[in-house]
Image: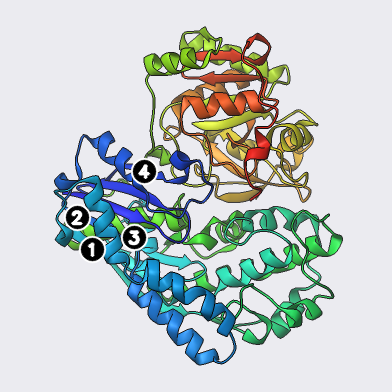
């Protein structure tokens, strides 16, 4: 059975193809359109998934959308009616968009699908629920036969948090918390207050948190959230504007924290870091309590997580270290992009498919589910760009890259299939020597073109992880924060955050094989099995998808070298003019 899942029209549109329960392909639209967090219909991603499988749309048994738009519209109307006459300005701005574009999404989807394939049968279009899609994206590809399932995000139709249980091919959501009470929206409110972009800058707030002191935790509990021992919660809506206004918070919230929200691009203040530290601690506690309740209700020792809040690596790390579960598995594309995958999986198992579980590995193929390019195609594309390169065999390539990294170079690394989800995992990565004291500043200021406080993640050989980090489990998708081992903190300053922590990626057999080979070559050369791994892009740009994307980013930044397939490019040897305006083309995220 061939099932295509789609997420679209909010943020991070994506398409995913599942064949007989196996994930075959998945990609975000932004990688093709080059528009960060692209929310449009995922025409390019959908077309690519079909081409990858050698299918046309008429061959697909079902196309499944990741949520139910009419129920979402119902929530919008009921919210405005509940708060009327407050929020009329917001209502007046939103309702024409809904009436024009969103209320009739079923018809819009059918039309777009027929444009791709005139033979598409509209009766094949199905709809899942938002949080069921999240839950399915986590459980059905997890390595667990049975597991508790927890989803947390801003809001879907009505649900913002769900708790359920998966057993074999069955998934049941048993408990929900509904809008407007939402951990995701609470965190987004603080993201907005700190001057970062909602639905984009939450990871910046997480990265800023270790720079501050949690001075405002009790104030948050006293005024903003009533968090119960079982993890259920209610927000004090008097302090928030997202139900009735055009922004997340208003004057009362600002008075509570002693001043107006920071404007984007204004200098960060100590208060911003303290605010970030405080809300992070509250989110950590909420996640721990919800997980404890999930454990108590299900009696299971395995937990699956999805939803945008599941991308909060700090909360995940504390849950892994302090929570009641023996095993934790988090969907690497935990946000709305992963909803496309969950929608396809929901339909697969709803039609009686048996689920085969391999306890030794998950069903995500290391999240390496996107496009790849043959060596012949890479060389043809580089030739067309006027690039100069050396073609090496694999051993010589990895040795040359290791030497360059040891010498202090920043390396673009483009290999194999592109990652699905927000993290670069060694297929579309920028790499640097983690021992280099100035690497963080160089990468932030001269290559990534982003804020100086932003930390970088370490990639480490899985078998060496416990020697370098306070981590006793695998973290292949860079979704757990752990402490850097005390004896190693001085050795890898580029990835050691101000509080001694790091967002760790363990690279084992499931990872990109050439990336693992590079880590081994670097360890052989230096004795260090750790590299800085950050996404191959500049601030505001989607991660590179094609060889052309990689070369343009290489030439538009101060990257020293680029390994793309078995081709090694040195900046000093290029005769193509460097693109001095490259970073300015992308809007800050």
Which of the two discs, 3 and 2, sits closer to the camera? 2
Identify the element where label 4 is drawn: helix
* Disc ID at residue 62: 2
Q: Is the Cβ of the residue at disc 2 closer than 8 Å to that at disc 4?
A: no
Residue labelled with disc 3? 136
Q: Secondary structure at mark 3?
A: helix
Residue to which mark 1 is pinned: 126
Q: Is residue 214 above or below residue 257?
A: above
Task: Choose mark 4 or mark 3, whichever is in front.
Answer: 4
Find residue 77 and report its horizontal and vertical position in percent: 44, 84
Residue that mark 4 sits on: 45
N-term-proximal mark, 1 vs 2: 2
Please say if the residues under marks 4 and 1 sit with CB atoms less than 8 Å apart: no
Q: CA distance from mark 3 to mark 2?
A: 16 Å
According to the image, what is the colour scheme of the structure? rainbow
Label 3 or label 2, whichever comes before in sequence order: 2
């Amino acid at each position: 059975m061939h099932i295509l899942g789609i997420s679209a029209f909010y943020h991070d549109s994506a398409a995913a193809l599942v064949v007989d329960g196996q994930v075959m392909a998945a990609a975000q639209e932004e990688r093709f359109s080059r528009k960060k967090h692209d929310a449009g219909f995922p025409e390019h991603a959908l077309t690519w998934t079909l081409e990858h499988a050698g299918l046309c749309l008429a061959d697909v048994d079902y196309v499944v959308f990741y949520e139910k738009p009419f129920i979402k519209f119902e929530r919008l109307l009921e919210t405005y009616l509940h708060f009327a006459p407050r929020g009329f300005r917001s209502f007046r701005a939103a309702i024409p968009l809904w009436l024009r574009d969103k209320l009739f999404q079923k018809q819009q989807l059918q039309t777009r699908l027929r444009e791709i394939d005139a033979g598409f049968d509209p009766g094949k279009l199905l709809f899942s629920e938002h949080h069921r899609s999240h839950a399915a994206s986590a459980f059905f590809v997890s390595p667990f036969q049975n597991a508790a399932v927890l989803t947390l995000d801003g809001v879907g139709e009505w649900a913002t948090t769900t708790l359920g249980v998966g057993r074999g091919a069955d998934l049941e959501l048993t408990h929900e918390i509904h809008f407007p009470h939402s951990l995701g929206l609470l965190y987004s409110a603080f993201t907005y207050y700190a001057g970062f972009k909602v639905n984009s800058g939450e990871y910046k707030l997480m990265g800023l948190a270790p720079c501050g002191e949690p001075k405002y935790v009790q104030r948050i509990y006293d005024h903003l959230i009533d968090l119960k021992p079982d993890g259920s919660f209610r927000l004090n809506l008097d302090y928030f504007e997202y139900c009735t206004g055009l922004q997340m918070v208003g004057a009362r919230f600002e008075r509570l924290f002693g001043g107006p929200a920071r404007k984007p691009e204004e200098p960060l203040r100590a208060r911003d870091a303290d605010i970030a530290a405080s809300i992070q601690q509250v989110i950590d506690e909420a996640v721990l309590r919800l997980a404890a309740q999930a454990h108590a209700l299900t009696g299971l020792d395995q937990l699956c997580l999805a939803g945008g809040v599941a991308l909060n690596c700090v909360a995940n790390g504390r849950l892994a270290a302090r929570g009641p579960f023996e095993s934790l598995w988090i969907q690497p594309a935990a946000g709305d992009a992963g909803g496309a995958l969950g929608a396809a999986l929901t339909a697969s198992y709803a039609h009686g498919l048996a689920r085969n579980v391999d306890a030794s590995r998950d069903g995500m193929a290391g999240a390496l589910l996107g496009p790849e390019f043959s060596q012949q195609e890479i060389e043809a594309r580089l030739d067309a760009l006027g690039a100069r390169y050396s073609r090496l065999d694999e051993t010589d390539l990895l040795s040359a890259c290791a030497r360059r990294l040891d010498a202090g170079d920043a390396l673009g690394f483009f290999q194999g299939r592109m990652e699905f989800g927000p993290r670069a995992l060694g297929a579309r990565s920028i790499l640097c020597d983690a021992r280099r004291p100035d690497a963080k500043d160089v990468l932030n200021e001269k290559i990534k073109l982003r804020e100086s406080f932003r930390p970088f993640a370490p990639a480490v050989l899985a078998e060496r992880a416990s020697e370098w980090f306070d981590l006793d489990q695998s973290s292949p998708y860079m979704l757990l924060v752990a402490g850097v081992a005390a004896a190693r903190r001085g050795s890898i300053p580029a990835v050691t955050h101000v509080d001694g922590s790091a967002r760790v990626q363990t690279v084992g057999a499931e990872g990109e094989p050439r990336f693992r080979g590079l880590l081994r070559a670097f360890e052989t050369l230096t004795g260090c099995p750790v590299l800085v791994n950050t996404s191959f892009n500049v601030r505001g740009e989607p991660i590179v998808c094609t060889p052309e994307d990689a070369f343009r980013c290489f030439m538009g930044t101060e990257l020293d070298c680029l390994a793309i397939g078995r081709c090694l490019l040195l900046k000093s040897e290029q005769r193509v003019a460097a693109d001095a305006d490259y970073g300015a083309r992308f809007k800050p995220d």
